Amino acid sequence: KQEVTQIPAALSVPEGENLVLNCSFTDSAIYNLQWFRQDPGKGLTSLLLIQSSQREQTSGRLNASLDKSSGRSTLYIAASQPGDSATYLCAVREYGNKLVFGAGTILRVKS
Amino acid sequence: DAMVIQNPRYQVTQFGKPVTLSCSQTLNHNVMYWYQQKSSQAPKLLFHYYDKDFNNEADTPDNFQSRRPNTSFCFLDIRSPGLGDAAMYLCATSTRTGVDGYTFGSGTRLTVV
């Protein structure tokens, strides 16, 4: 059974700092991996999608990497801002249409 | 903009009183999903529709049912809500291959009183 773990569970950083969020998964037979952002009481906003054949994806200040063989992904946020404060969720899509989530990393960026 | 819309955003229901949550999409995606997310937990898949084919997760309680009358709409019915069913309910869609990832709605926060 696929299990997704995110470390750290919570992170507090000063504004302007670069930071890395980690995601690991137990079964490397994945179709793709998606990073989401969730603001309190809201739905999920897709940030980056990495196909299993890809190594990384970039969008603005965000960069996500994928090492499928080792079961790891990282989300790099450059020059963090208070508006980046949210919960970040990693999810892997297994073959068969099922998306399995990690519990998330709660990020707080202090001004 | 193509999107996934959930109504209502907030729903309060009485213990044991049936409630229906709705989801609509303009993406014309084949697959629609319902997830339950309790406070500080990962979203948990309840079931999904692959076109009209219903796929229930093994551990989804019988209290939860779903309907998909057409491609655009999907409903989550909770027959007899208990206090433990209070949660955020998230609807999502994807294409048949899922190559473009999942698109989520804004969620419905269910409170049971």
Image: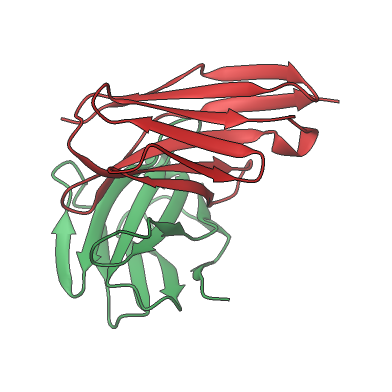
Tell which of A99 and A63 is nearer to you: A63
x and y, in percent, of residue B24 in the image:
44, 74
Picture layout, residue B32 above or below residue A25: below
x and y, in percent, of residue A41 in the image:
61, 45
Query: In which quadrant of the rendered image does the C terminus of chain A lie?
Result: top right
Q: From this viewpoint, is residue B100 visible?
A: yes
Residue at horizontal 51 percent and vertical 71 percent from the top: B3
Picture layout, residue B86 above or below residue A75: below
**Chain in red (letter):** A
x and y, in percent, of residue B46 in the image:
27, 50
Residue reaching furthest right?
Answer: A111
Tell which of A82 and A51 is nearer to you: A51
Query: In which quadrant of the rendered image does the N terminus of chain A lie?
Result: top left
Would residue B32 be found to the left or right of residue A6 on screen? left
Figure colour of chain B: green
Picture layout, residue B33 above or below residue A51: below
Residue at horizontal 59 percent and vertical 26 percent from the top: A106
